Image (spheres, rainbow, N blue to C red):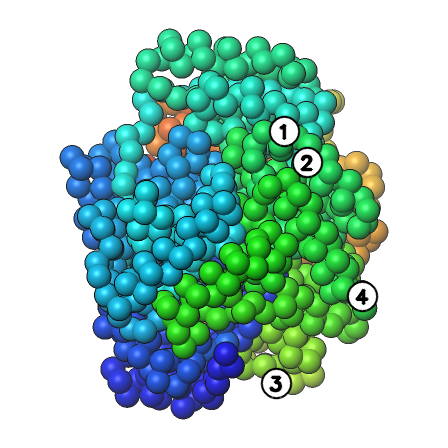
Amino acid sequence: MHTVVAQPQSLATALRSRGVRHVRDDDTTRAAYSSDASLYRVVPSAVVLPRDVDDVATTLALCLDRGIPLTSRGAGTSVAGNAIGAGVILDFSRYLNQVVSIDAEARTAVVQPGTVHATLQQAALKLGLRFGPDPSTHTRCTIGGMIGNNACGSRTLAYGRTADNVTHLDVLTGTGERLFLGGDGTPASPQTDALRELVRGELGTIRTELGRFGRQVSGYALEHLLPERDFDLRRALVGSEGSLAIVLEAGVSLVADAAHKRMVVLGFSDIGSAGDAVMAVLPFQPTACEGLDSRIVDVVRTRKGREAVPDLPAGTAWLFIEVCGGDPQEVSDRALRVSRIDSAVDARVITDPRQAAQLWKIREDGAGLAGRSPVGAPAHSGWEDAAVPPERLGAYLRDFDELLRGHDLVGFPYGHFGDGCVHVRLDFPFGRADGRARFRAFMTDAARLVASYGGSLSGEHGDGRARSELLPIMYSEAALALFGSVKAIMDPDNVLNPGIVVDPRPLDADIRSAHAPSVRTGLALSYASDGGDFSQAVHRCTGVGVCRAENTGDSVMCPSYLATREEKDSTRGRARVLQEMINQGGANWRSPEVHDALDLCLSCKGCASDCPTGVDMAAYKAEVLHQSFKGRLRPITHYSLGWLPRWARLASVAPKLLNRLVRLPLLSRLALWLAGIDHRRSIPTFAEQTFTDWFQAREPRPSAENARPVLLWADSFTNYFTPEVGRAAVRVLEAAGCTVQIPEQPLCCGLTWISTGQLDAARTILGKTVGQLAAVAHAGIPIVGLEPSCTGVLRSDALELLGHEAAQPVAAATHTLAEFLATLPDYVPPNLQGTTVVAQPHCHHHAVMGWSPDAALLQQAGAELTQLGGCCGLAGNFGVERGHYDVSIAVAEQQLLPAVRGAAAATVMLADGFSCRTQLQDLSDRRGIHLAQLLDPS
């Protein structure tokens, strides 16, 4: 059936007139919702953020009146393309996201469809319970989305699929009828009566083709409608991908978390052998049995460092197995027996919980890390979760590898081997003229292969746009006709997620990257990791949605999303808007939608390290600002804050006078207004003596014969605003046996020009600095930076702006203070026993250099350390610009300000970043200090 999509404005107006409160039809929002975690792109007409059930019912009624498609969406982590649509998107995650109740005695919970899995898990764990299914996206996927896909996760062997854990569903069908489906049977209604009649005539088809093994998720789960299963429509709707009904509320069962767990890692000669061994593992009743091979392990080591992967047993493929139970000795004995399985070439029983967590993290990060193939090319979903009966897994894996070779594709298979489910992303050549044809050819051959093994096209993600067209390869005409009949009963007007399962869209239609032209000319940054292509860089985002997670540990990404909860303010949302800009005809750099999406990006660079696909939104924002304002008048803050080092250098001529003047209330307010700075901010105090002047005026300290030379680079912030940090660093380095030198004249890295997109000027400034530091680097003298963001420029941005050949020697020679001290074998930090330290690592420190050397140094010194994550909220110029103050405060409230309020008076607030210390000073009565000041021996 063909549907007519209303124009966005008329549709939104009609929804609002009927009382739907949160309707978004602006181009920015529509672009942000144009894709999910799949490779597909469909721009919706409007997005509704329902506040209650009435909003949902009203939206459905309007869509039925006008024949407008309606797609339910949770976190948008669907990799099959079943959370996008051309009509209205219902985003349940914004408001309908509450755990309604938990009954600990009955071990059940009631949740709204937008409830994030981790939110339910956190509430349940307080009562010693958990929700069994645990997808790798558990930090951001929603229960409604899990119901839509019949999500499973790593521990299905013990806890079952989502369908096995649903106690009731409150739904609206495609006719607008509301049904409450509980464990006491399916109520009678015209629709349910019609379904019963249909099933009575199709028992043979259902019994022979559906529900053959646990991971058969493709199609509709009509086996639950069999008489022997009491016509359980509740479970039959699970996995229907929002194409039969809209979930308004769900009841789910909970389980007691196992008291004792033990991990076993088995090594094998190849991935096929690992698959063969599954049937020998299953009798030991594992909670999880996950498989992967060296292809994904090598990627983790490359992208996250070798320390991210603990020592693995010998082999090139591994099974990660978890056994659990109430008796610690029994669990230990069972783990030992698993480790002795004959077919393994090596084995390890993991007793350290931290090592076990690291190993499970490799598996959990697979979906994101797999966004680049082992050869570094973009990798895509599409054929990412096929499943076969576990007893046939080994042979299937061998044939699948042969299939990849035949199609000249590369990827790394991994997944839930105990269930026979295999995940993979592949480097389909969508940039080539025949890219879509090659994609179709592979998908068709892959479907034939899995069907020949009695398997399922989907093992947990659903068919979506990627695989619905292929269902005839797996099912008979009778089964397909049955699916169509069920759809016609439950959604006769084909409004709910059309094109999914029944009457499918072509699998090679609407592919996002296939419509993306290259953007290579006139760029300011090199995008060396993306072949010099800005388009390929922004298409790094695969949509797995890590940026939407609560990220309240030591992660940074994405602080603005946590402040606003708006999709457009997530890293993924911004990437989608940039992709849409390119897909609609190239780089329209001045597009209002792009600037709207980038406005609240703090340029914190958290995504550069925390996004598993390596999206660097700070770089993309700088490029957009550069291209937009090149040769044009810029916003005032680009001159006031973007040129801050220049103004600071001028102020150093008469700092006392200037400090007095800017403290005059009227003059201060005028200065802030003229500079585009929020009136609630303060102008920082200029140092009365710069660090450079102090260093050049001091008496040279005699050097020991074996003293190690080091160049201390005082950036503009240290030199002109906080020279006390530089002075402390000199004392620390000299006490460590070093001879300290500084550049002959102050050198600027151009950071403020970079963050405001003045990249031509930044290249000139940075080129001069790198040119002068190059002689030091070539002489083998280490360079120590004090301001993390500036140090990060030498380590990272310089490579993009100046090129690898020019910048790499300086980048390699540049260290943070903690990194450099760690290279001195005889350095002993001061005794910090009894000192409590709350540390706010600078975002660029976390993202570019990593903060682990600092943590190790403080722990070596005996400090009691609490390391915060997130961003301080100031983020250079962001938090002081007019229009950003409220978001800046909201970001600070995520971790920094609560930690400050909870800290004792004697607690040291450690903040190496000038921005972080400024935020502390502006928003609290506490003062932050630099690591150099904490280690200062004087």
Query: What residue do we see at 28% from left, 63% from top?
Result: 193
Mark 2 falls on what kind of element?
A: helix
Structural distance between the alpha carbons of marks 4 and 2: 27 Å
* Left or right of 650, for residue 157: left
Q: Do we see residue 646 in this rendering?
A: no
Which numbered disc flags the more N-terminal residue, 3 or 2? 2
Marks 3 and 1 in Cβ contact (< 8 Å): no
Residue located beneath label 1 in the image: 275
Q: x, y percentage for residue 668? A: 38, 74
Q: Are marks 4 and 2 in contact (CB under 8 Å)?
A: no
227 or 657: nearer the viewer: 227
- Where residue 188 sits in the image (x, y, percent)? 22, 61
| Dot in front, 3 or 1 | 1
Q: Amino acid at mark 3?
A: Leu
**Alpha carbon distance from label 3 to label 1:** 62 Å
Closest to the observer, 701 or 454? 454
Give the mark nearer the N terminus: 3 vs 1: 1
Q: Which residue is mark 2?
A: 397
The nearer-to-camera label among 4 and 2 is 2
Image location (x, y in percent) of residue 674: 46, 81
Mark 4 closeness class: few <14, some 14–19, many ≥20 residues within 10 Å: few
Residue flagged by tag 2: what amino acid is it? Answer: Leu
**Lower position in the chain sequence, tag 2 or tag 1:** 1
Instruction: Identify the image quadrant of residue 50.
Output: bottom left
Label 4: which secondary element: loop
- Front: mark 3 or 4: 4
User: Considering only order in the chain, which callout, 2 or 4, is on the residue closer to the N terminus?
Assistant: 2
**Marking on residue 633:** 3
Please name the residue that numbered disc 4 is placed on. 434
